[in-house]
């Protein structure tokens, strides 16, 4: 955030009174728009949205998003037109589904359509737009804005709405690029009225309140940011007065506030449950606390503790500066600082971390434990309504087991010995339709072990599935500590007798375990058995993929000159030589 | 003309439009201030309701032609 006043939590009504000031500031921000990807936000709603649009503009600039906003109407014709339009730009749709539109007096051209028809229109819209790589944020049909006087909302809610909202729930569960947004929940989390009053409706046709527009705009801008850069991955928390009430070093485990017996105890129990829910969705939990390790760990043996020490993948409990501890956590987990969120009740600790590690999201959650949850729920840095892949569900466990691995690793003097003991198993196979979401996810968010950083859309992956000149290889990895799931992908394009590796990427959790050698061995053998004479790979350097700079050389490739920004390598080896590649993995080959 | 009310309105305008030297007179209308659009209209109404602790009805707002009429309306409503 460039402007601290605009970082949530804020007072939305107070911000409204300075809207013009912030708009001016936004216009003066001179971030290089030509450099960033341009995004078009299409609002399909049909209400007066200029306040919402102005505030999206303000928040988007804060998040370095280059957004152009286009307003349109909601309805079958508009949905159809939107899903058919072929735009080169990345489009994000804000589909404002409103109860008003289901009432014949309000939207006359809908009279001819049944609820099922409308559900179908929305389904087709979602399928076509997300398949094209676009994104959709759709509200549930649940507004309490101004209705024609004779409307029986209760009756509507119990008939039409249930099936329509179920449709939205299903779409969100099926499409990675589709989010269903509950405005009632936004109202609940922020304790601010989102829908507007009747006066502003009759005067201006506004359906959102002033404050509601600001909050909704913030939510939409943050969601767009999440779509583009992926959600945060790690939540680092303090212990005293963050996971339980009181100071465990002073009060002792029996006196800390946790559980049903006190107000604070109930709040902290809910905070712990929320963290456990995040963990089950693949968010990695970590602790940074100024404490004595033994005393602090006792907190998790409290009879009402929801969380166990083993739920945390990394812990830095000592008296050093939190900024340096958090850096250690980031290194230990092999996750970039910009993927971390830090929650602490102490403003001094928050400021210290913010100052030294500006990449980290440190919400100003105050000292009131009630705010920790509402801030996390509102900011939604982990994008918790996103469709999950199997790997998301396994991630937290695999990181916690990684902690076990690291412990064993330090014990073991010989790394090769350790790798052998880890019993790494690789299953190489051709991915199918059911793996598509994971392919998209891993390809589009992996930055370190990623040779060309070429991103792919859903149709691109389809092409690799169907086109006889293209092929995608994948591997699942597990070891005795747990499963990593599908964590390796290799895209190959056949060019006569040459196989060109279009991109090859692996999750940061599995490299440096000789998995890369094992996988290459299997893929190269397969390509040779298909009659290929040589394999070509290229390395496009970025700030973050230096770790694989020399991997092709290590595998036996020879560098050939090419344009400045690309290093091209050629591999022409015999089957016998490929067999000599060494690694410490057991392989199941289904290629 | 109640100049005390006019002065308070002027301050609201100056803060809202982020312009300390903005002149607001009884005869000032939306046409005189370039940035006075619908977004500003709503923000200004909200600011005035907070400042004077009162609430306008839709017709009040629609009827207003200039700042002078706004001053009169606030005076009537507060008395």
Image: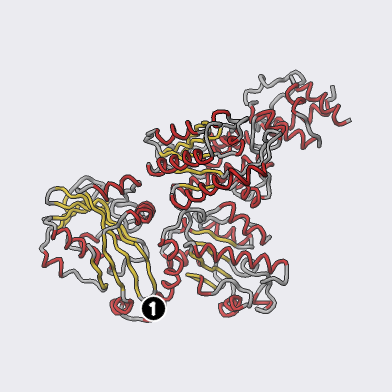
For the residue labelled by badge 1, is the local secondary structure a helix, a strand or a loop? helix
Image coordinates of residue A106 in percent, x first then y, are 61, 30
Q: How far across and down, in percent of the image, does residue A492 sit? A: 23, 52
Q: Is residue A472 visible?
A: yes
Tell me which residue sits at (30%, 56%) in the image.
Answer: A432
Q: Read off the chain for label 1.
A: A
Left or right side of A507 for A529: left
The residue that mark 1 highlights is A410
Which residue is at a point 43% across and 61% down the rendered structure image? A392
Q: Quadrant of residue A37?
A: top left
**Residue positioned 42% across, 36% down in the render:** A83
Q: Position of residue A102 (x, y in %)?
A: 58, 36
Q: Residue at x 57, y 52 (%)?
A: A379
A322 or A120: which is nearer to us?
Answer: A120
Callout 1: 10 Å neighbours few (<14), some, many (20+)? few
Scheme of image coloration? secondary structure
Q: For residue A126, what is the image quadrant?
A: top left
């Amino acid at each position: 955030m460039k402007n601290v006043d605009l970082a949530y939590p804020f007072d939305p009504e107070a911000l409204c009174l300075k809207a013009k000031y912030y708009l001016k500031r936004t216009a003066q921000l001179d971030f290089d728009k030509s450099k960033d990807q341009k995004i078009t936000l299409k609002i399909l709603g049909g209400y007066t949205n200029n306040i919402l649009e102005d505030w999206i503009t303000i928040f988007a600039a804060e998040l370095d998003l280059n957004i152009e906003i286009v307003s349109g109407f909601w309805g079958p014709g508009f949905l159809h037109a939107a899903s058919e339009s072929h735009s080169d730009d990345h489009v994000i749709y804000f589909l404002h589904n409103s109860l008003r539109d289901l009432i014949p007096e309000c939207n006359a051209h809908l009279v001819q359509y049944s609820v099922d028809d409308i559900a179908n229109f929305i389904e087709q819209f979602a399928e076509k737009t997300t398949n094209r790589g676009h994104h959709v944020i759709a509200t549930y049909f649940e507004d309490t804005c101004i209705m024609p006087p004779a409307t029986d909302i209760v009756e509507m809610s119990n008939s039409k709405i249930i099936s329509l909202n179920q449709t939205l729930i299903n779409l969100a569960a099926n499409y990675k690029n589709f989010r269903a947004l509950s405005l009632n929940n936004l109202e609940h989390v922020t304790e601010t009225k989102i829908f507007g009053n009747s006066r502003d409706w009759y005067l201006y046709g506004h359906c959102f309140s002033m404050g509601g527009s600001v909050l909704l705009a913030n939510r939409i801008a943050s969601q767009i940011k999440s779509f583009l850069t992926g959600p945060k991955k790690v939540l680092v928390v303090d212990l005293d007065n963050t996971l339980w009430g009181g100071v465990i070093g002073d009060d002792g485990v029996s006196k800390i506030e946790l559980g049903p017996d006190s107000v604070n105890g109930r709040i902290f129990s809910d905070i712990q449950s929320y963290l456990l829910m995040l963990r089950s969705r693949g968010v990695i939990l970590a602790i940074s606390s100024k404490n004595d390790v033994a005393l602090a760990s006792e907190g998790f043996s409290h009879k009402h503790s929801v969380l166990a020490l083993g739920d945390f993948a990394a812990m830095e409990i000592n008296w050093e500066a939190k900024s340096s501890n958090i850096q250690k956590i980031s290194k230990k987990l092999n996750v970039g600082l910009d993927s971390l969120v830090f929650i602490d009740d102490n403003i001094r600790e928050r400021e210290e971390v913010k100052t030294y590690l500006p990449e980290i999201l440190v919400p100003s959650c105050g000292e009131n434990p009630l705010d920790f949850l509402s801030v996390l729920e509102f900011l939604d840095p982990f994008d918790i309504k996103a469709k999950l892949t199997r790997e998301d569900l396994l991630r937290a466990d695999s990181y916690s087991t990684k902690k076990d691995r690291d412990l064993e690793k330090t014990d073991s003097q010989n790394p090769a010995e350790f790798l052998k003991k880890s019993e790494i198993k690789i299953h190489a196979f051709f991915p199918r339709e059911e793996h598509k979401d994971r392919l998209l996810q891993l390809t589009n968010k992996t930055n370190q072990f990623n040779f060309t950083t070429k991103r792919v859309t859903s149709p691109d992956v389809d092409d690799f599935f169907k086109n006889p000149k293209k092929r995608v290889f994948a591997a699942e990895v597990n070891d005795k500590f747990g499963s990593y799931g599908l964590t390796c992908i290799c895209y190959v394009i056949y060019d006569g007798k040459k196989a060109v590796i279009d991109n090859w990427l692996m999750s940061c959790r599995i490299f440096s375990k000789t998995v890369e050698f094992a996988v290459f061995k299997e893929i190269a053998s397969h390509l040779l058995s298909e009659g290929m004479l040589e394999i070509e790979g290229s390395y496009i350097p970025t700030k973050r993929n230096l770790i694989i700079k020399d991997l092709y050389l290590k595998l036996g490739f020879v560098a050939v000159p090419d344009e400045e920004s690309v290093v091209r390598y050629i591999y022409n080896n015999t089957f016998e030589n490929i067999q000599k590649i060494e690694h410490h993995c057991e392989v199941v080959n289904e290629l | 003309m109640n100049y005390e009310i006019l002065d308070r309105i002027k301050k609201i305008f100056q803060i809202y439009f982020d312009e300390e030297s903005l002149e607001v007179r009884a005869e000032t209308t939306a046409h005189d201030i370039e940035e006075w659009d619908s977004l500003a209209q709503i923000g200004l109404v909200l600011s005035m309701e907070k400042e004077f602790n009162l609430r306008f009805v839709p017709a009040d707002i629609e009827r207003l032609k200039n700042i002078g009429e706004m001053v009169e309306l606030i005076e009537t409503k507060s008395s």
